[in-house]
Amino acid sequence: MLVLMLVAMLVAATTLQPCLLASARQLCRTHMVRTGKVFHVRQQIQGDQLYFSSMTSHLIKHPCKKNIALYLGRRLFFTRDNFRSSLLPLSIPTSMKAGLPEVTSAHIAGSVLLLVVSRKVYIYNYEANYWNTSIGIEHPVSHVSGDNCCYSGHPFCVDISNSVFAYLHGDQISQTNIYFSNNGGFRYQKFAYEKQAELVGSLGGIFYFHSLSQVGLLLIDQGKARFSYSEHPLNFSFGLPFDYNGTLNILITPGQKGILIFWFERSLLLSRNSGQLVYPLQVKEGPHTLLSSISEANVTIYSVAANEYELAVLTQENNLYYGSLGILSSSLIKFTGQNIWSQEAALMFTDVGRVEILVPLSDPVFPAFDFEKCPINIQEILMDPQLQVDVCKVELLQGEFDNKMYTIDMNSELELTALMIPRPGMSLVPLAMVSNPHSLGLQAVIYEDGYTYDGNTRHRLNISLRQQHHWGRADPNFTSSIKRPTGSTITLDIANKEISCVDLKPLTALISVGCDQEKKIVIQNEISACYNGILDPVGLQDNYSYVIEREAYDPNFQGQKASEDLVVHYHYEKLGCPHLVYYNTPWKPVVELWREGKFQEVIQAEFVLLEVNGLFTYTYSLTANTALCRSQPQNWTTIMSDAGDKGLFSWNRENYVSCHDPDNEAPLMWPDVPYQILGGPTANKVIFEQRNGIYIFYISIVDPYYSYCHLETTFSVYVYGAFPLSVIPTAVIIIPLVVMLLSVWLVYAIPKLLHTEKGLRFKSFWAHLCRRCRKACFRGGN
Ligand SMILES: *[C@@H]1O[C@H](CO)[C@@H](O)[C@H](O)[C@H]1NC(C)=O
Ligand SMILES: *[C@@H]1O[C@H](CO)[C@@H](O)[C@H](O)[C@H]1NC(C)=O
Ligand SMILES: *[C@@H]1O[C@H](CO)[C@@H](O)[C@H](O)[C@H]1NC(C)=O
Ligand SMILES: *[C@@H]1O[C@H](CO)[C@@H](O)[C@H](O)[C@H]1NC(C)=O
Ligand SMILES: *[C@@H]1O[C@H](CO)[C@@H](O)[C@H](O)[C@H]1NC(C)=O
Ligand SMILES: *[C@@H]1O[C@H](CO)[C@@H](O)[C@H](O)[C@H]1NC(C)=O
Ligand SMILES: *[C@@H]1O[C@H](CO)[C@@H](O)[C@H](O)[C@H]1NC(C)=O
Ligand SMILES: *[C@@H]1O[C@H](CO)[C@@H](O)[C@H](O)[C@H]1NC(C)=O
């Protein structure tokens, strides 16, 4: 019995009675999904059944997990198998005390569903199957907005999926409360939009446009709408105004390309640049009629669906409009069908060129709903000669970089390659577009070369992405602040391709203009204290500790003597053998850049050092004056007092201001203070005092123009030569006699001494002695 039931459940009775739509141009055949209803196992709806506030039906698909979708209509249905099984309507547990179960907005953020029910945000974690309320929202909200990044687990991508806004649509902008969450919608904080108080109009939405690295706020005023942006350089201007009739639904298409679709019953608008320019889509009604917008077609839009590449619209007049979201093409083509529209119908893309009309059907016997599906193959329909659609000129467009994520750090560029094959005799215009040219003046240049293969001409495309900044042409009024990491996408498409090129998807990559996480700094350690016999690596590895005398360090880094000696445990695993530095020679570490475990270059950029235990028995060779500072240089004292409790080691590329910077207005009041910045334009060096011992330095690259990364590390040096070790040479003569006695004594003494700095010194003395001894004996042998 149990087995039978399982079999019955597994062999889900998906397809029942395919019925043909009686139409001259048959758009699709419907079939019904009905599963798990063989036995009278009664499922019960628990909690309050949710419904959508809008008169039309919406369908939200998870852009990364293709089988996850939410249907919003008179009931809500949440599926994890793309509506391949019957479903109970979604309900919210009564324990959530949601009140009126009316949903005004929904967003799928990673593995949770965010729903605005009765002006509050609720979280449904569909993987763990629990509900919760959000934290931090103190005023009523009606909408949530967010995006999903499917490219990788890179922090830039994760941040995209975690950023969520909650707001009250239609509220006066100047005084409305906007909330932002950076943890996927659980916890919110009030979002401070810089110019909010000055903005006039009501709020049409707020969105994080990651492809432009801007927050865009939609202002509605007197039938017109326009975007206001948060960051330089767009914060100076607004997007161009556009007609705002009815209440526009705003659809951000997946893939971070900056494509937005605005629609309500009578209008359909598109933007390809995150709202800077919004325009109506042209409509091709027949081979010879072109309407300038869908409002001229006298139709009532009911449901709109989009994926990364294309757009489909279902109207109450049983029409389906289809359009490509390529770089340039922006018209819709009309297909007429019959009985494809119904009150509950919603549209979705199941794949590229595959649209499905979905209708939930109630069942008088079971509480679970079945689904009627009508799949449409766009490519097939476009082949209909009546439509007189030109055949696609492109045979192939392919590139390794498609759907990948790349990082461009400063001083680096990105080369992408693609292959393009036209139909014989045709010529194509490839086009590469970056979504955020403000990102350090990011530019894409295509280099093309053709060759003949099998009688066909193939075109190799090299796309080179660079920052104008490094070409010395960046206009500060056009470019984002160089210090701010940003993001962009690059899309490669064929400019003059036909609507029939359904399967020829544009190629897109996501670009993080920011820290390249593979970058590390390494301090060159060619002269290690171990290889020179000064320190013993075995002793260092054996839980070695040393004492810093109280006169030499300050635990508060203020240069004041401490009240007691400090015992420091040496972390050999982390620090290795110290670098050997002779106390009397001005010194500067050689800092190397490594990437993915490979040496790249010696870093010439500015950096700073700090002894981590507070040792202050060193200074610098230059002063503010001799370093030719125009303004008072920063130093560790000023940085630490500015940072407050943000941590001691907080001198980095973000707070560093060069004293050579013409914009730096701090007057040079103390020209004789030590100049604490090494590298860069000066020849500054570290000068050690007469003191032997281990120094552990924290190093931070502070030059803001070297890399977006916080390049930092710790390393150790052993300063030697300050004590009168010169007693040793005299020993050479008496060696033969003393050696025997000494060695006997050392066997007892060394194990005790080894754990101190003196012990290591002693051991090195012994090693030194032995070498000399061997040398002497050898000579004697001659
Ligand atoms: C719901 O949120 C509250 C408040 O943050 C938390 O204490 C509780 O653990 C959450 N419930 C679940 C099931 O995660
Ligand atoms: C735009 O941002 C820049 C840099 O952050 C700032 O200096 C400027 O005042 C801002 N402009 C407006 C109009 O907010
Ligand atoms: C909006 O309405 C105005 C007047 O009512 C009309 O002129 C305009 O074409 C409409 N715009 C759209 C995009 O529907
Ligand atoms: C739309 O309706 C108007 C007025 O009702 C009419 O003039 C126009 O021809 C119609 N357009 C189409 C494409 O049917
Ligand atoms: C494209 O790059 C490849 C490999 O770097 C090179 O061999 C080829 O000459 C380049 N083609 C063009 C047109 O720049
Ligand atoms: C930037 O804009 C300001 C004010 O709009 C203008 O005075 C300045 O000349 C512009 N700078 C450049 C490099 O175009
Ligand atoms: C290292 O030395 C410290 C203090 O001298 C001691 O507490 C610790 O147990 C030692 N660890 C090992 C692995 O010997
Ligand atoms: C740090 O700089 C301040 C002035 O900015 C100066 O007064 C102070 O003496 C400097 N400290 C050190 C240790 O050089």
Image: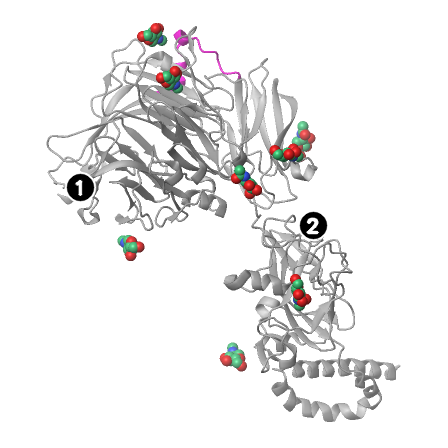
**Residue 83 visible in the shown view:** no
How did the renderer colour the structure?
one colour
Return the x and y of residue 487 as percentages of the image width and height.
Answer: 53, 40
Name the mark on residue 48: 1
Return the x and y of residue 182 as percentages of the image width and height.
Answer: 41, 48
Mark 2 residue element? loop
How many numbered dots are placed on residues in this image? 2
Q: Quadrant of residue 385?
A: top left
- For disc 2, the marked residue is 661
First to last magenta residue range: 377-393
Q: Quadrant of residue 456?
A: top right
Q: In the image, 232: left or right of 522? A: left
The correct choice, above or below, for 277 with respect to 618 in the image is above
Amino acid bearing label 2: Asp
Q: Quadrant of the C terminus?
A: bottom right
Residue visible at 50% across and 64% down in the picture = 645
* Residue 386 painted magenta: yes
The correct choice, above or below, for 244 with respect to 194 in the image is above
